């Protein structure tokens, strides 16, 4: 993983983008999905044992789904990046001069004068031509490169951690309080997660808290409505 600060001590939030996205998505989905599942099942007037079974089953299925989804998605991104690099490598071997001029043109567009831009392009290509074009022509860097295994593992792990919270609450409180306790604990944790993610990513904290809490509350209200509908005696 790339360093998160430079020699001057400046924090570079983009270096966290890969694992942070997967971690936040996993934990948020774990809390919202399982809290909603538990609240929906509890609203249907079932036993505490049935709530626990539903919660654990949801945790296992959700963690595997997150891992598989992230792996497939990020693997597709990695395949695209690899294909782009192969095309660029072929272009460099077939027409080096054209690729050098292309790189120099990019540097000119960024503000360098033509002579300096050409010198920079020559020196960078002598050092590592493919890396220079990957970074400045295609836009690929080590920080933003796709890592399927990392994304899959992070999402599955954080989903499981997030999902464990509403399950634990549903075990510890009496059945009559399960819906209220799970909802309250989940919203508190979602707010904390939203603030933590915003802070780690350099975004406004209150905005992060608000958006995560809003969607989490909406999901729980909807699942409660569904559970109540199916729990009505007819």
Image (tube, rainbow, N blue to C red):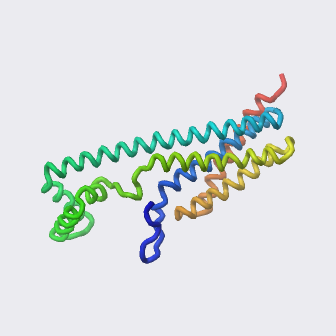
Q: Tell which of 40 and 218 is nearer to you.
A: 40
Q: Tell me where residue 72 appears, x and y as whole percent.
A: 46, 39
Q: Tell me where residue 36 appears, x and y as whole percent.
A: 70, 41
Q: 158 left or right of 232? A: left
Rendered residue at 80%/48% (across/down): 181
Q: Quadrant of the N terminus?
A: bottom left
Could you tell me if residue 65 is visible in this image? yes
Rendered residue at 29%/55% (across/down): 134
Vertical arrangement, residue 18 with respect to residue 156, above or below: below
Q: 2 left or right of 222? A: left
Q: Tell me where residue 4 appears, x and y as whole percent.
A: 47, 67
Residue 46: name its quadrant: top right
Could you tell me if residue 224 is visible in this image? no
Q: 172 left or right of 83? A: right
Rendered residue at 23%/69% (across/down): 112
Rendered residue at 45%/61% (across/down): 15
Residue 139: name its quadrant: bottom left
Vertical arrangement, residue 79 with respect to residue 6, above or below: above
Q: Tell me where residue 29 appears, x and y as whole percent.
A: 61, 45
Give the tally of numbered discs: 0
Q: Tell which of 140 and 104 is nearer to you.
A: 140
Q: Which residue sits furthest top?
A: 234
Q: Quadrant of the C terminus?
A: top right
Q: 70 left or right of 129? A: right
């Amino acid at each position: 993983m790339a360093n998160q600060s430079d020699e001057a001590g400046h924090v570079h939030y983009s270096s966290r983008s890969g694992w942070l996205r997967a971690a936040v998505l996993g934990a948020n989905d774990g809390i919202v999905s399982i809290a909603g599942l538990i609240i929906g099942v509890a609203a249907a007037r079932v036993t505490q044992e049935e709530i626990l079974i539903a919660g654990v089953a949801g945790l296992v299925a959700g963690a595997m789904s997150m891992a598989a989804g992230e792996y497939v998605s990020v693997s597709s991104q990695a395949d695209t990046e690899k294909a782009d690099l192969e095309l660029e490598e072929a272009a460099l071997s077939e027409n080096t001069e054209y690729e050098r001029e292309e790189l120099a043109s990019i540097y000119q567009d960024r503000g360098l004068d033509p002579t300096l831009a050409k010198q920079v392009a020559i020196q960078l290509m002598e050092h590592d031509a493919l890396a220079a074009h990957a970074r400045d022509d295609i836009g690929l860097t080590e920080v933003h490169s796709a890592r399927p295994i990392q994304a899959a593992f992070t999402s599955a792990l954080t989903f499981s951690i997030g999902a464990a919270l509403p399950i634990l609450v549903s075990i510890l409180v009496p059945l009559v309080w399960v819906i209220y306790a799970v909802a309250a604990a989940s919203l508190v944790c979602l707010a904390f997660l939203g603030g933590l993610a915003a802070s780690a990513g350099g975004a406004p904290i209150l905005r992060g808290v608000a958006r995560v809490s809003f969607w989490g509350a909406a999901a729980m209200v909807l699942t409660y409505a569904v559970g109540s509908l199916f729990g009505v005696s007819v």
